Image: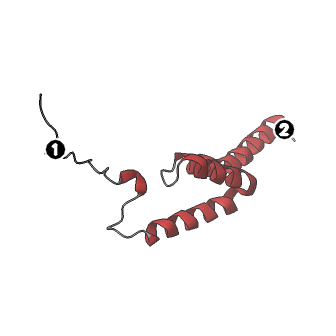
C-alpha cells in the first residue's frame, strides 16, 4: 500500500479520535477540574465520552431554574455599613 494513503488514513483516524476532546475543551459548559476530568474521559472513551458529556451537561443546565443563575454569574452582596454609632473628632 502507498505510504501517502497510509499517512492520510492515520491522520484522519487521529483527527477523528481527538475531535471530541477539542469540542469539549472549546465548550463553555464546564470549567476547572470538571473540564479536566471530562477531557480525560473523552480521550479514553472518544465519542462515547463526548455523548456522555453532552447528556450530563445538558441535564445539569435543565435542572437549574431560570431564577437560579449559575454560581459564577450571581451578583455579589454589597456589605452595608452602619455609621450612626461612629463619632467624628
Question: Residue pushed farthest top?
Answer: 89
Q: Quadrant of the N terminus?
A: top right
Quarter occupied by residue 48: bottom right
Specify few, some or many for label 2: CA neighbours under 10 Å numbering under 14, 14-19, or 20 or more: few
Counting from the top left corner in percent of width and height, residue 53 is at 60, 61
Residue 65: image x %, image y %?
38, 70
- Left/right of residue 70 with respect to residue 16 in the rendered view: left
Q: Nearer the viewer, residue 77 or 88?
A: 88
- What is the quadrant of the C terminus in the image? top left
Q: Residue at x 21, y 45 (%)?
A: 81
- SS for tag 2? loop
Point out which mark residue 66 bears.
Answer: none
Would you say 28 lies left or right of 45 here? left
Q: Residue furthest right?
A: 1
- Crowdedness of circle 1 by 10 Å Cα count: few (<14), some, many (20+)? few
Quick one: label 1 or label 2, which is nearer the N terminus? 2
Identify the residue shown where x is 44% and y is 70%: 62
Front tag of 1 and 2:
1
Q: Is there CB contact under 8 Å for labels 1 and 2?
A: no
54 vs 46, left or right, is left
Residue 64, located in which quarter of the rendered image? bottom left
**Residue at (68, 50) in percent of width and height:** 16
Horizontal and vertical percent position of residue 49:
67, 60
Q: Quadrant of residue 3?
A: top right
Identify the mark at residue 2; answer none if there is no mark. Answer: 2
Does 34 appear above or below 61?
A: above
Quickly name the residue at label 1: 85
Which residue appears at 31% of the width and 52% of the height?
75
Q: State the SS at label 1.
A: loop
In this orientation, which residue lies closer to the viewer: 31 or 13? Answer: 31
Amino acid at each position: 500500500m502507498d505510504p501517502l494513503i497510509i499517512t492520510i488514513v492515520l491522520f484522519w483516524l487521529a483527527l477523528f479520535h481527538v475531535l471530541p476532546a477539542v469540542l469539549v475543551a472549546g465548550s463553555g459548559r464546564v470549567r476547572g477540574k470538571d473540564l479536566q476530568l471530562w477531557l480525560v474521559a473523552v480521550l479514553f472513551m472518544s465519542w462515547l465520552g463526548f455523548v456522555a458529556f453532552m447528556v450530563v451537561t445538558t441535564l445539569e443546565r435543565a435542572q437549574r431554574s431560570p431564577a437560579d443563575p449559575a454560581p459564577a454569574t450571581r451578583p455579589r452582596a454589597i456589605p452595608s455599613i452602619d455609621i450612626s454609632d461612629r463619632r467624628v473628632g
